[in-house]
Each structure stands twice: as structure tokens, then as C-alpha cells.
Image: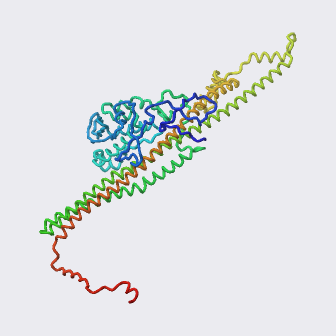
């Protein structure tokens, strides 16, 4: 299979070529695909501006342009693409039972001057809808649901866990900001309506474009699965499995798949485990210092004088260590552990994206195989038809050569009997004859009886059946040619768009890991600085305690000798 041309919505300078009608005998997949223009699926005219908060937008050293455009679909679109540094915030998480029989947590979202409220399940439905609307893009993940173990341990309080709610707030805010900074997803009106507090989300889910989504996106255009004017030839496309092998795989995506598998194994394996263990031990270390500080402060009350002050200062230094360690553990959780978990989810998302592209490639090859098989079948049918016509012509010529009998000649008695018998005898039809239909062998099942009856209703004329087969095969070939043309376009569009989004994701990953490393270094530096200040102050207080009375006096410092020291060179020379 030839290499695919780069034709994707990330390329703003390339002009789309209008599509030609399909139904051609040969499909040239070197022609670029040409989905109809859709403003919400085009790259905005500029790239997002650098953002210092996580998630990062890239190294500050790289010059970037602001995410600005002039054509807006709504007020939220205007806010997101105004060119200002706009960040979506989740300001609060409130417990409510509005519109439900049981209480739930709703998250307050602030976008500029707009405020909306959504529960976790609505975030989940937003993401699942975007996955179906944009099957060739990397849709950012949301925090995972509570596990069965959490529900078993916390029971009815699992949904009200403050730590879990705070974590969801942070990760859902990251999810929304990643959508807002994506060059294509930020233009999606469904996302804009999610940020609008005056729109019912249930109404959005039951209105276009979400209501127009097909049941199987593999049998819909890759550039716009909701396209109602898509060719009916999409129904002829097969529905392959993700495990189906390819004859001619694309090496680029094999490499991407291998790299993603390694990345996922490393993140979900040693990296995530060590991170969880590190955060846990820092938290335990902080808790130990909290108990030690309380014990020292209580012990200082039993002493007097400078000793009491020194013990109290030591206890305060231990408390400062407890507070700085608690803050360090929280920052490690927010700026290191959570991004690691998010990128582990990203690896699973990319696997599914590559599986979709793999299925599209299999779909193309299976359509190709089906078309070749139908063409061979048509060739065999036409060959049989040609042989039948040649035989018919030969038989017709032979009957014309044979002389007919004279009309004056009387037929013999034997010929008369044969003619009378042939004229009076009518062969029984296997269908309508009840005697033949009922005279079946004992034990004949229902399916055999049904097959026997249908066989009687069918046209048993081989010539008509053959010609009908040729006509139907030609129609199928025409439909498969259209389907192959569409499959080639979808495959090229999917390959180029997925590759472009993978490149964008790689740049995002590099910038995010850079910010994560810098954040970790700053957290440890601040932890060390605060602890150093606290313990230096405690040391000054300890130095004020008088020496022990039984302590031997320190020897006086040796007085410097007044004698002239020998020259080192003299010593070396032996003089």
C-alpha cells in the first residue's frame, strides 16, 4: 500500500481538493481525501499562548502565538479565543440533590464571567460524546471512577470523601483546560454549551450533533460521523475486529504502537508504584513529626529556664518540619503523581486511537478482497454465460440442418403413442404439488421442509438464474467500488490526522514533564529551606543552655610558637 499523503485539519495552509464521485473501477488512494468543510473541525488560525500552570503549553523559550480567531459561534467561543490568557477554573464542589432522589456532588465551573454546574457523570458523557464525534483525535482523560474497594471500605461515604473530591476538582479542571487549548476541540460547540450554565445538558445530549451519531462509527465518515449526506456505500463496509491482522501495515503506526506500549508499561508499572510509595512515606514521615512535636512541646512544660525554651524551640522546629513535609507530600501528589496517572490514561487512549486506525486499514483491505472476489465471480459467471450461448447457438444450427418430416407423411403408431403420451404428461412441480410436498421421508425436520418449499417457489430456469446472478454481481461490484473509494479516503484522513495529533501530544508531553520536574525541584528546595530556617533557630536556642557542671573544662588553645618555623624547602633538601 502506498504511503499516505498528509491531509489533516491541523494543516492550515493546505487547501482541500473537492471530492469526486465514486463508482469507479479503480480507486487511487494517492488522491487526498476531501471531507466537506466543517468550521468546528478546522484548526484555529493561531496556536495557544504559553501557560505556566499545569498542564504546560510548552517551554517558554519557544515563541508561540495566541489562540485568536475572528469568527465566533457563541459567547463561550469568544471568551476561549479572545487572545487573552483565559483559564477555566473549578471553584467549588457542592453537595446537592437538585433533580435527583439521592444527593450528589456538583462542580462549579467558571469560564470568564460565565458559571456552570455539572456532576461527574456529565463530564463523563461530554468526553464519551467527543470520542464519538472525533474518532481520530486524542481526547484528554477524566479522573477514574471510585473502585469497588473504595465503596466497600467507605460504604455510603465514598462519594463524599474530601480527598477524592479535591482530586477530582483538580483533574477535571485540567481536562477542561486541555480541551480549551486543543486546536480543534476548542472550536466544538458541544464543549461551549457544556460551559454555558443556562443550557440543559440533557437537552444537548438529545440534540444534534450528538443525536445524529451512528451506532457504529466504523461505518461512518472519519472526518464527520454525523454527516447525514454520507454515501450509502458506507453500509457495505465490513466491521473488522481490532485483532485482525494486516497484510501491509504502516510502519509509522507500528512504531507508535510499540512506543505507546512501552510508555504505558513504564508509567503504570514502576513509575506509578514508586510514586505512590514515595508520597505515602512522606505522609507517614509528616505524621510522625506531628506526634513528636506535640510530645516535645508537652515535655517543655516540665522544665524551666533555658532548657525549657530549648526543648520548646526544638518542638517548634519539628512542627515546622511536619508542616513543610505535609505541603511537600501534597505538591508531589498534585504536580507529580496525578500527572503520572493522567499520562497512564493517555497511553490507553492512544492505544484505542491506534486500534481505530488499524480497523480502518483492515476495513480497506477487506473491502479490497471482497471486490476482487466479486470480480472473479463475475468473470466466472460471464464465462458460463458465454459457454451457454455458444452451446445454444451450436444446438440451434444443428436443428436447422436436420430436415423436418413431410406434412403428408402419416406418423407411425409408435411415434403417435410417444406424441400422445408427451402431450398428455405434465411433470409435477416440486412446490405446488401437495402430493410431492407431503410425501417426505419420516423424520424430515422443519428447516428441511421450509427449504423444500422455498426451492419449489424459486425459479429453476438456469439461464434466468445465471443472468440474474450476473446482474446482482455487477451491482455488488459497483457498490464495493464506491465503498473502497470511501475506505481509502477515510484511511488517509485517519492516518494523517492521528499522526498530526500524536505529534502535538508529544510536544505537550515534553512540556508537561519539564514542568513536572521543575515543580518537584522547587518543592524540595522550599522544603529544605523552611526546615533549615527552623532548625537553625532551634540551634541558637540550644546553644544558650549552660554547660553541664561535671563537664571537664575545655583545654586552652595552644599558644602560637614564637620560634621561627623551619622552611619547608630546607626540610625537603635535608638541610
- Does 415 appear above or below 362? above
Identify the residue at image location x=20%, y=80%. Answer: 554
Image location of residue 315, percent across then percent down: 20, 63
Please tell me in which quadrant of the rendered image residue 395 appears: top right
Residue 469 vs residue 152: left or right? right
- Does 116 appear above or below 341? above
Image location of residue 92, percent across then percent down: 27, 42
The residue at the far top in this view is 408
The residue at the far bottom in this view is 575
User: Is the N terminus in the top left, top right, bottom left or bottom right quadrant?
Assistant: top right
Residue 430 vs residue 191: left or right? right
Q: Nearer the viewer, residue 9 or 339?
A: 9
Image location of residue 251, percent across then percent down: 56, 47
The residue at the far left in this view is 304
Image location of residue 496, percent across then percent down: 52, 40
Residue 237 vs residue 291: left or right? right
Q: How many marks?
A: 0
- Does 278 appear above or below 383? below
Residue 479 vs residue 152: left or right? right
Q: Nearer the viewer, residue 195 or 162?
A: 195
Amino acid at each position: 500500500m502506498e504511503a499516505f499523503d498528509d491531509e489533516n485539519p491541523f494543516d492550515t495552509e493546505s487547501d482541500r481538493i473537492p471530492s469526486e464521485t465514486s463508482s469507479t473501477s479503480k480507486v487511487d488512494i494517492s488522491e487526498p481525501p476531501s471531507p466537506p468543510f466543517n468550521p468546528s473541525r478546522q484548526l484555529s488560525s493561531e496556536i495557544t499562548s504559553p501557560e505556566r500552570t499545569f498542564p504546560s503549553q510548552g517551554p517558554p523559550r519557544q515563541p508561540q502565538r495566541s489562540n485568536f480567531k475572528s469568527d465566533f459561534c457563541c459567547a463561550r467561543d469568544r471568551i476561549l479565543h479572545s487572545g487573552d490568557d483565559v483559564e477555566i477554573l473549578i471553584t467549588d464542589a457542592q453537595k446537592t440533590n437538585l433533580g435527583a432522589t439521592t444527593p450528589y456532588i456538583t462542580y462549579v465551573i467558571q469560564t470568564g464571567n460565565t458559571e456552570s454546574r455539572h456532576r461527574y457523570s456529565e463530564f463523563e458523557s461530554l468526553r464519551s460524546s467527543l470520542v464519538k464525534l472525533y474518532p481520530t483525535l486524542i481526547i484528554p482523560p477524566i479522573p477514574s471512577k471510585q473502585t469497588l474497594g473504595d465503596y466497600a471500605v467507605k460504604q455510603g461515604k465514598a462519594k463524599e470523601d474530601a480527598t477524592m473530591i479535591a482530586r477530582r476538582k483538580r483533574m477535571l479542571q485540567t481536562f477542561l483546560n486541555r480541551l480549551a487549548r486543543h486546536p480543534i476541540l476548542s472550536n466544538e460547540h458541544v464543549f461551549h454549551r457544556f460551559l454555558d450554565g443556562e443550557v440543559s445538558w440533557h437537552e444537548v445530549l438529545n440534540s444534534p450533533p450528538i443525536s445524529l451519531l451512528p451506532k457504529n462509527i466504523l461505518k461512518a465518515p472519519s472526518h464527520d460521523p454525523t454527516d447525514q449526506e454520507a454515501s450509502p456505500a458506507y453500509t457495505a463496509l465490513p466491521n473488522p475486529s481490532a485483532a485482525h491482522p494486516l497484510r501491509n501495515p504502516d510502519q509509522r503506526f507500528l512504531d507508535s504502537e510499540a512506543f505507546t506500549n512501552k510508555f504505558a508499561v513504564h508509567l503504570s508499572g514502576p513509575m506509578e508504584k514508586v510514586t505512590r510509595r514515595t508520597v505515602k512515606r512522606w505522609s507517614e514521615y509528616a505524621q510522625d513529626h506531628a506526634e513528636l512535636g506535640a510530645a516535645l512541646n508537652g515535655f517543655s512544660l516540665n522544665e524551666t529556664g533555658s532548657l525549657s525554651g530549648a526543648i520548646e524551640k526544638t518542638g517548634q522546629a519539628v512542627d515546622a518540619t511536619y508542616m513543610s513535609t505535609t505541603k511537600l507530600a501534597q505538591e508531589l501528589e498534585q504536580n507529580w503523581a496525578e500527572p503520572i496517572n493522567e499520562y497512564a490514561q493517555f497511553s490507553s487512549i492512544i492505544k484505542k486511537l491506534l486500534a481505530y486506525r488499524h480497523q480502518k486499514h483492515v476495513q480497506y483491505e477487506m473491502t479490497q478482497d471482497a471486490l476482487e472476489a466479486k470480480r472473479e465471480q463475475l468473470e466466472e459467471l460471464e464465462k458460463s454465460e458465454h459457454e451457454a450461448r455458444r452451446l445454444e447457438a451450436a444446438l440451434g444450427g444443428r436443428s436447422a440442418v436436420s430436415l423436418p418430416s413431410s406434412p403428408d407423411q402419416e406418423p407411425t403408431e409408435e411415434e403417435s403413442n410417444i406424441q400422445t403420451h408427451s402431450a398428455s404428461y405434465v411433470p409435477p412441480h416440486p412446490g405446488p404439488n401437495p402430493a410431492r410436498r407431503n410425501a417426505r421421508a419420516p423424520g424430515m425436520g422443519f428447516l428441511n421442509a421450509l427449504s423444500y418449499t422455498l426451492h419449489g417457489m424459486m425459479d429453476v430456469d438456469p439461464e434466468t438464474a445465471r443472468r440474474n446472478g450476473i446482474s446482482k454481481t455487477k451491482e455488488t461490484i459497483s457498490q464495493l467500488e464506491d465503498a473502497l473509494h470511501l475506505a481509502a479516503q477515510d484511511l488517509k484522513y485517519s492516518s494523517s490526522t492521528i499522526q498530526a495529533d500524536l505529534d502535538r501530544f508529544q510536544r505537550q508531553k515534553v512540556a508537561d514533564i519539564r514542568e513536572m520536574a521543575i515543580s518537584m525541584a522547587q518543592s524540595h528546595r522550599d522544603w529544605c529551606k523552611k526546615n533549615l530556617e527552623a532548625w537553625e533557630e532551634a540551634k541558637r536556642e540550644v546553644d544558650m543552655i549552660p554547660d553541664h557542671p561535671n563537664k571537664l573544662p575545655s583545654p586552652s588553645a595552644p599558644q602560637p610558637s614564637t620560634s621561627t618555623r623551619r622552611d619547608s624547602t630546607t626540610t625537603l633538601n635535608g638541610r
